[in-house]
Amino acid sequence: MEKMMNVQALLELLERRDLHALRAALLEENEVDIAEFLEELPQDKIVVVFRALPKEMAAEVFSNLEADTQQVIIQSATDQEVSAIVEELYVDDAVDMLEELPANVVKRVLKAARPDTRKLINQFLNYPDNSVGSIMTAEFTDLKQSMTVSQAIAHIRRTGENSESVYTCYVTDAGRRLEGVLTIKELLLAQDEQLIADLMETDVITAETTEDQEEAVARMMKYDFISLPVVDKEGRLVGIVTVDDVMDVMEEEATEDFEKMAAMAPSEKPYLKTSVLSLAKHRILWLLVLMISGMITGGILGQYEAAFAAMPLLVTFIPMLTDTGGNAGSQSSTLVIRGMAVGEIQLKDFAKVFWKELRVSMLVGVVLSAVNFVRLIITYPGNYMVALTVALALFVTVMLAKTVGGVLPMAAKLCHADPAIMAAPLITTIVDAISLVVYFRIACTLLPI
Amino acid sequence: MEKMMNVQALLELLERRDLHALRAALLEENEVDIAEFLEELPQDKIVVVFRALPKEMAAEVFSNLEADTQQVIIQSATDQEVSAIVEELYVDDAVDMLEELPANVVKRVLKAARPDTRKLINQFLNYPDNSVGSIMTAEFTDLKQSMTVSQAIAHIRRTGENSESVYTCYVTDAGRRLEGVLTIKELLLAQDEQLIADLMETDVITAETTEDQEEAVARMMKYDFISLPVVDKEGRLVGIVTVDDVMDVMEEEATEDFEKMAAMAPSEKPYLKTSVLSLAKHRILWLLVLMISGMITGGILGQYEAAFAAMPLLVTFIPMLTDTGGNAGSQSSTLVIRGMAVGEIQLKDFAKVFWKELRVSMLVGVVLSAVNFVRLIITYPGNYMVALTVALALFVTVMLAKTVGGVLPMAAKLCHADPAIMAAPLITTIVDAISLVVYFRIACTLLPI
């Protein structure tokens, strides 16, 4: 059950400016809920409530705020307050914040930070977007081989306050090179006098700072890790990726795929926060490309003008034919694109996918054509040849659509392009053109036109 | 970096039947990798290697195997071996396995389990699909308010071996009712003599066994939890949901949405493991529904037969017009459906979405229409009125498509239907019908037909 926050009571305390009682009430709430509460307040009230927060909650609440709310707070805070916030934040959260802020505010924040924090932040800001380095955090639990279990536990109890995840401990040598790993569970279950060197797992699965974040996420999912150590080119431990970041990446990547597959340029911002102009920009390029392809289809259709001038009835089946082709194709392409995204389908499965789609399409095609044939005979009694034309064209369309839809995403991958490009819209356009040619070829053969 | 397994060496040891060396070599590998290795072997070899596994690895490897491989092992194992596997598995993994096995094998497994394990498994099997109960695990760390920190740590060190996650500790009363929560980090950072009662957080965020798993996942993501306690109707702690299950659910749910949005019935099995018949069954219903809707569009088109008989050129613009409408609409519906799935867009944002889509569609519509107008004037010089007809129809189509596409998923939600139903295929079909009527109405007004 989600705990309901007593928003009304908080607002009343705020109204009465009883900051002491407000502070006490906030202490009872979860930081994520407080952040949500702040988002709903007018700008001047945001600052008042934020200042009333107990110091130990402020950074956590701050890291859960939207970028524009963070900016409001930073802009009305003193240099000392800014410094306190930055030092309390985990480096990855601080970097996320800075990436969203305008340049002058970033300057001020960096100036307020301590030199070592500033150096760390600058280093993180240099990792490319979507790299492992850009999502990792610099705080982790660092043990030495020579420690005993009780020394290690004492070490964690002394230093653990600064590490985002104490659940997995990493063992490094004097040169910060990663030597081993053990979980806090293994540590707790061991005997006090055992040596870390004897307990740790030495075959450590890691990620590199420059690797794609998606690969690190896939690795964590595969091994069910709650954190993954990140090393630089020299094998030195520089940070860890924690599972909460992984969940965010998973959600982002899925959203990106949804956008690409609906023929949009992927956007970083949530829908309601994106401007109309930027939404339009993200959509128009693909619409233009596909519109121009649609014109080509129209050109093909133009070559059969004589046919549908002689028999206008033929035109009325076009929407049903092209829509069904598009839908049949996008079913196949969606399954294959998703299968590749989650790593289930690989390039070596090309023949398997083709053969599967061929058989599925024949099954589906037969059923759809039969339904169509019967329906046409009932609606247009006597017009057997028209019914046969439409049914045959539909069968061929479904077969082509499904095999093309299943195979093109893999072909894209083979050419090192993003398979998601071969989603519904493009498949539909391709299948449209083919199915219309097939339809009119069959019509010209079977019908007296 | 993913560690490469020395598959060749393992195969050689297997070939030489040197089980002792094989066992030693396997001990060096990760359980997930061993499971992958087993999947590639022929059936008889699977059993040999599985038997060679050190006992403490066997259950972990087993839970990472595909259902059909698990079945091979269970069927060739003695009752005693089956019992050992079941007792070692976490209850949620055991239940996942049983759900995939044929009834006679399930019976055998349950017979081999200890009575209390059997009772627990039976209880878990009764939770409905997609409920929180179906993904939770029964093993967790259970503390009492009266314990001191050092007693609690000693308790965990004594009993922790059985709990899937020791990272968050739950505090219960004598009646197993959940009273509080604290992380192992908080426990380690506290003083030895402090009381659990004074350290624990009492406002616990929980899930109920019968709740939808998606809600529990959303809650864990919101609060960045690595486990969530699950209570029954009486508030008694019955299990926890761990973050690895959450990642699996997230991936499943996204896949389901992809499937629904491409007009398919969602399937539980991965693509390559699904039979042709079952794939066809999942696809055909929606194709039929949409095909019949396409026929209605054809019927509408039939009413304008006179128009395109008089001017066949009009027909050649139909694919461009309907495709662009479909694409424009599916862009909007995809963004809104996804926004609702991740909780960013709520029903109260209805007016905001409508207003945003209206403005975006006007921008996009103007650009597309202008490009089209210019192109038509170049291709068909002198035919100004045809160019104007197509450009106008395109503008209206894009506007309708985007507003309808943005608003219909929210309307579906309002009627307690799944918003994903209003994805590309259905929006395309709806927009097709409207845009054709608009097109021919404009044509009949502006052109001499």
Image (cartoon, coloured by chain):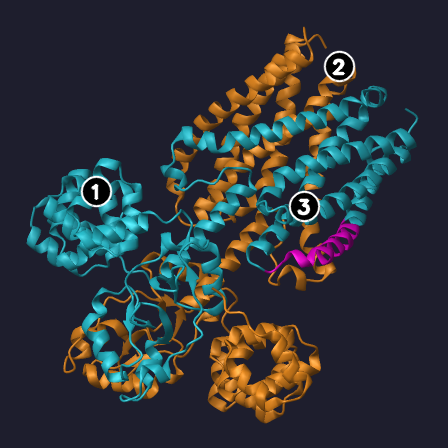
Chain colours: A orange, B cyan
* Callout 3: SS: helix
Earlier-in-chain disc, 3 versus 1: 1
* Badge 2 amino acid: Met
Q: Residue at x 37, y 41 (%)?
A: A348
Q: Quadrant of residue A382?
A: top right
Horizontal arrangement in the rendering, residue A372 relative to residue B198 (left or right): right
Q: Which residue is mark 1?
A: B41
Please state the chain letter of the residue tagged with numbered disc 3 in the rendered image. B
Position of residue B113 relative to residue B247, above or below, is above
Q: Which image quadrant is residue B29 in?
A: bottom left
Is residue A205 shown left or right of residue B332?
A: left
Which is nearer the eye, A82 or B405? B405
- Residue that mark 3 sits on: B408
Contact between labelled residues 2 and 3, with CB atoms less than 8 Å apart: no
Describe the element under mark 2 as helix, strand or loop. Answer: loop
Quadrant containing the N terminus of chain B in the rendered view: bottom left
Front in this rendered view, residue B288 or B107: B107
Label 3–label 1 contact, CB within 8 A: no
Q: Based on the picture, tell me whether residue A287 belongs to the magenta stretch.
A: no
**What's the residue type where badge 3 is placed?**
Leu
Above or below residue A421? Residue A114 is: below
Q: CA distance from mark 1 to mark 2?
A: 61 Å
Counting from the top left corner in percent of width and height, residue A343 is at 40, 49
- The magenta stretch is B344-364
The three-letter amino acid code for the residue at tag 1 is Leu
Residue at the far bottom in the pictured view:
A80
Residue at 24% across, 84% down? B150
Tell me the CA gap for discs 3 and 1: 50 Å
Q: Is residue A243 left or right of residue B196?
A: right
Residue A311 bears which disc, if any?
2
Q: Quadrant of residue B102?
A: top left
Report the Cα–Cα distance between label 3 and label 2.
Answer: 37 Å
